[in-house]
Amino acid sequence: MSATPTARLMDGTRLARHTLEEAAARAEEISGRTGTSPCLATVLVGDDPASVTYVRMKRARCAKAGIRSRHIALPATTTTAELVDTLAGLSKDPEVHGVLLQHPCGPHIDERAAFEAIAPEKDVDGVTTHSFAAMGFGLPGFVSCTPGGIMRLLEAYDVDLTGRHAVVVGRSAILGRPAGMLLLARDATVTYCHSRTVDLPAIVREADVVVAAVGRPRLIRGEDIKPGAVVVDAGYNPGNVGDVDFDTARTRARLITPVPGGVGPMTIAVLLAQTVAAAANQLGVPVGTGPRSTGPRP
Ligand code: NAP
């Protein structure tokens, strides 16, 4: 006989909708007060179909939220120096409030050099060394969007992180590593796991909060989830499958994100919220700096 699912779902689709509505209201307020609506510049090198789709989705969401977007499509032959010039130009352009470089850009581009050409106050995707360091020091700045979305989900579902053992599986610069740093800033006791970790299941079994950020379908088995744990699955693998074996994990977890509809929708929502906050800061409108609601209580 199979066990009954007990976990409540953490509804990222719903929270993302609320976050976008809030961003739209703030964008309208900024435009009403200054006559200028927030503007996100998107930069794409080449025509990789997945990247083209991601940029199109981001721009469509911007339009829906009353955020202007300016798209710069560069040929695949663009050099690092040319890309750096483009990003530096956007960083100086007072009409642009946020700059997003869609990546990966291709093997011939030095992505780190390109990211560093984005001015920190316009780094709404949280990719610069400056933003990363600010996050590490607990200073104001923009966070990487997917970890930012994970934190908003945990907050919206009232997950108390103080003293809890959070196990982050994955340590990439855009996801696992910043997720662990943000959890630490909320007083969780954080363990990072990665491809060299010995006996991952044993460590997962100790976790009050599991953040899966690997990119391996169903790597984390339900039987290893501690009863009552909170499970956040950022993984997105072919076939709409996460990094956690959802069907078995939900029989033991207290809260769990579905895939899709959990972490995924939060990423663009955080990007837009940060774009509006950047515009507010640059235009001197004191919105986006005050306390932020995390959405309707689920
Ligand atoms: P990544 O850069 O490939 O990093 C994967 C991480 O997983 C690495 O730290 C790697 O360890 C670790 N890892 C690999 N195999 C492992 C194993 N068997 N056991 C434990 N750890 C292992 O990937 P990423 O960009 O962080 O993305 C991770 C997942 O999140 C992907 O499924 C991606 O599609 C998804 N994602 C979703 C969103 C969203 O918006 N929802 C955004 C970004 C990414 P090493 O460091 O040792 O190599």
Image: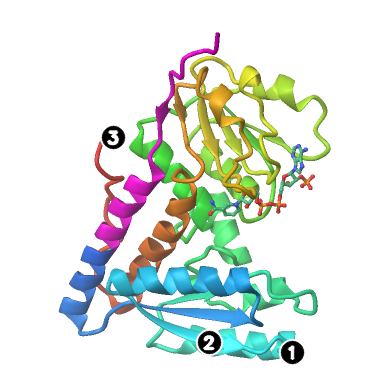
Q: Quadrant of the C terminus?
A: top left
Residue 105 visible to an observer of this rendering:
yes
Residue 138 visible to an observer of this rendering:
no
Residue range in magenta is: 1-23
CA gap between label 2 and label 1 equals: 14 Å
Q: Which mark is residue 145?
A: none
- For the point 26% across and 36% down, the residue is 297
**What element does badge 3 sit on?**
loop
Residue 103 falls in image quadrant: bottom right
**What element does badge 2 sit on?**
strand
Q: Position of residue 243 (x, y in %)?
A: 64, 38
Using a 10 Å C-alpha cutoff, classify the residue at mark 2 as few (fewer than 14 neighbours), some (14 to 19) or many (20 or more).
Answer: some
- For the point 28% across and 52% down, the residue is 18
Q: Quadrant of the N terminus?
A: top right
**What element does badge 1 sit on?**
loop
- In the displayed structure image, the side of residue 47 where residue 72 appears, left or right: left
Check the image and report above or below for 157 versus 294: above
Q: Position of residue 246 (x, y in %)?
A: 55, 30
Residue type beneath disc 2: Ile
Using a 10 Å C-alpha cutoff, classify the residue at mark 3 as few (fewer than 14 neighbours), some (14 to 19) or many (20 or more).
Answer: few
Pointer 2 residue = 72
Whether label 2 touches label 1, CB < 8 Å: no
Residue 44 falls in image quadrant: bottom right
Pointer 1 residue = 77
Colour convention of the picture: rainbow
- In the displayed structure image, the side of residue 44 where residue 11 appears, left or right: left
Pointer 3 residue = 298
Q: Position of residue 37 (x, y in %)?
A: 27, 80
Mark 2 and mark 3 lie on one chain; the one further toward the N terminus is 2
Is the residue indicated by label 1 positioned so its CB lies within 8 Å of ligand 1? no
Mark 1 and mark 3 lie on one chain; the one further toward the N terminus is 1
